[in-house]
Amino acid sequence: MKQLLRTNDPTQIAFAQALLSSEDIACFEMDVHMSVLDGSIGILPRRLMVRDQDLFIARAILTDNGFELENA
């Protein structure tokens, strides 16, 4: 799996998951439960992962919808 998105904003994660789901691209959210360690203040980012073969199209979908992604 490859990292597609890393953010502290849970609304961005939810929107990205909805976009990918609508295109039948499976994704997995990592670090969801890390809020226990940071006291739920949101300093630790969450990561959205996709399969290696879906990375290119997933990046295209998110950038077409206004996401600013880190360079891979």
Image (cartoon, rainbow, N blue to C red):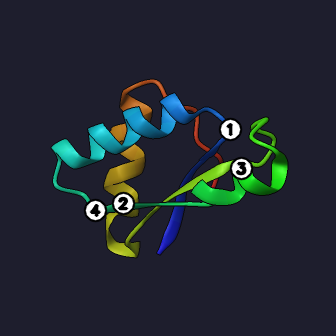
For mark 1, what is the residue? 8
Kindly report the distance in space between the C-alpha atoms of the residues bearing marks 1 and 4. 21 Å
Q: Badge 4: few (under 14), some or many (20 or more) residues near its Cα, within 10 Å?
A: some
Viewer-proximal residue, 53 or 5? 5
Q: Secondary structure at mark 1?
A: loop
Q: Is residue 68 above or below residue 2?
A: above
Specify the amino acid type for callout 3.
Answer: Ser
Q: Secondary structure at mark 2?
A: strand
For mark 2, what is the residue? 27
Q: Badge 3: few (under 14), some or many (20 or more) residues near its Cα, within 10 Å?
A: some
Residue plotted at (42% across, 48% down): 59
How many marks are shown on the rendered structure?
A: 4
Q: Secondary structure at mark 3?
A: helix
Q: Are marks 1 and 4 in contact (CB under 8 Å)?
A: no
For mark 3, what is the residue? 35
Q: Are marks 2 and 4 in contact (CB under 8 Å)?
A: yes
Q: Are marks 2 and 3 in contact (CB under 8 Å)?
A: no
Kindly report the distance in space between the C-alpha atoms of the residues bearing marks 3 and 1. 10 Å
Q: Is residue 27 above or below residue 46?
A: below
